[in-house]
Image: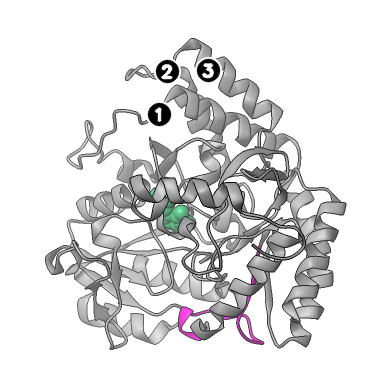
Amino acid sequence: MSGNGHTRKKSSELYRRACELLPAGVNSPVRAYGAVPGDPLFVERGEGAYLWDADGQKYLDCCGSWGPLILGHGHPTVLEAVNGAVARGMTFGAPCEAEITLAELVIESYPAVEMVRFVSSGTEAVMSAVRLARGFTGRDLIVKFTGCYHGHSDALLVAGGSGLATFGVSSSAGVTAGTVADTVVVPLDDEQVLRDLFAERGGDIAAILLEPLPANSGLLKQRPEYLAFLRQITREHGALLIFDEVISGFRVGLAGAEGLYGVSPDLATFGKIIGGGMPVGAFGGRREIMERLAPLGDVYQAGTLSGNPVAMAAGAAAMRVLREENVHDKLEALGQRLEAVVAPAAAEAGIAFVRQGSIFWLGTGPEAPRQVESVDADAMPRYGRLQEAALERGVYLAPSGWEVGFLNAAMTEDDVDHLAAVLAELVKS
Ligand SMILES: *Cc1c(COP(=O)(O)O)cnc(C)c1O
């Protein structure tokens, strides 16, 4: 269907079949290629830095299953742990040692977490952390930010209204006005709007919730002083600070954004990397807060498959590799290598190349934005053309210009050089 011999014959056939059975042929909306040309690629297998589509074409995988695959596909240590765990049983619904192992790894890595509870997705982790923050503080209001994504739980499917600090408006059909009435939405990087809000409603605010390194509407790197300000204003008013580190946790360093910026939240949420490719989420924080969870405390939270032994084994194996093999240093070096080529080419095209470690994003204008309001939505069709042309050159990027790209530890310098050459060429076209 397109140049360079690239074909989607088999993928398109599968897509047509899938569309009869699954809404839009997918089980998560952005996979449906609504924001880029062509039918979605169906993936047959992944190995190391690469994946292969149903038509047998090979791509350098810069999507990494949207973040989990920091070690690439099928890292031998992770596979061995999974195979060993599967042989002993897929689920018990009773405690198992693997839960302790992963908990120790998380708690040793992330200073603000003294106790942790495992769940099965990032959505569940944030939903539960919000409930816990409300239960612990006895307050109702949650403050969240435009441009931050926290999964698809009802209370967080909320958009800002027209004013600066507005009570949320449901951003999905099926989410009632009542459900989002206790969520206030504000722009990032604006201290005054929060000062005013806390002056007026400080005693009602349970928590500020944010991605400390927002990476779901482009890569909106925040000023460290702003994060310190959030820490200070929440402390002053007895509210909690929740870092949603589902995408940044274990990605930008073992201590995530907490380590990167030196600002410690009361609660943190994790997902993606923490499961080593299996469905795992987690939330954790100060002991006195976590001990409010059922059955110790009065905040209910549960899960049939939570702490699943296979998923725990995968996560622990991935975490051990991250700790023992200096993965983040290697990824930073690869990131610098990519940036050295792509940033100047992008600048020539009037576009900022934004990067933090192994996360990268092509902006829509010359400045790296700190607020989603500064991202130019009209530039997204241009990204669609770039994504399509990259596929023809053997590079698989996320099918939306709002999404970041990821390097992984299975990539070689040659892989990154190829990626750099492709992006440098296409960003100018
Ligand atoms: C991906 C993501 C979520 C949702 O996690 P799921 O596992 O998709 O439910 C929540 N918060 C952030 C910051 C994320 O990047």
- The tag earlier along the polypeptide, 1 or 3, is 3
Which residue occupies 43% across, 46% down? 17
Counting other residues with Cα less than 10 Å from the Cα at mark 1, is it few (<14), some (14-19), or many (20 or more)? many
Q: Which residues are magenta?
A: 360-374
Which residue is identified by label 3?
A: 85
How far is mark 3 from mark 2, CA to CA? 11 Å
Picture coordinates of residue 321, whole percent (x, y): 69, 34
Location of residue 419 with respect to 328 vertically, above or below: below
Considering depth in this image, is 300 or 70 the residue closer to the camera?
A: 70
- Mark closest to the chain's N terminus, 3 or 2: 3
Whether residue 10 appears in magenta in the rendering, the answer is no
The crowding category of the residue bearing disc 3, from other C-alpha atoms within 10 Å (few below 14, some 14 to 19, many at least 20), is many
- Report the residue at 79% width, 73% height from top: 424
Q: Is residue 364 above or below residue 295?
A: below
Residue drawn at point x = 80 percent, y = 79 percent: 345
How far across and how far down the image is residue 343, in percent? 77, 76
Question: x, y (%) of residue 352?
Answer: 68, 80
Labelled pair 3, 2 in contact (Cβ < 8 Å): no
Q: Is residue 204 left or right of residue 217?
A: left
Mark 1 or 3, closer to the camera: 3
Residue nearer the viewer, 230 or 325: 325
Structural distance between the alpha carbons of marks 1 and 3:
13 Å
> Dot 2: within a 10 Å radius of its alpha carbon, few (fewer than 14), some, or many (20 or more) residues?
some
Going from N to C along the chain, the mark reached first, 2 or 1, is: 2
Q: Which residue is mark 1?
A: 307
Question: Circles 2 and 1: CB distance less than 8 Å?
Answer: yes
The residue to which callout 2 is attached is: 96
What amino acid type is highlighted by mark number 3?
Answer: Ala
Q: Quadrant of the C terminus?
A: bottom right
Q: Which residue occupies the foreground of this view, 143 or 342?
A: 342
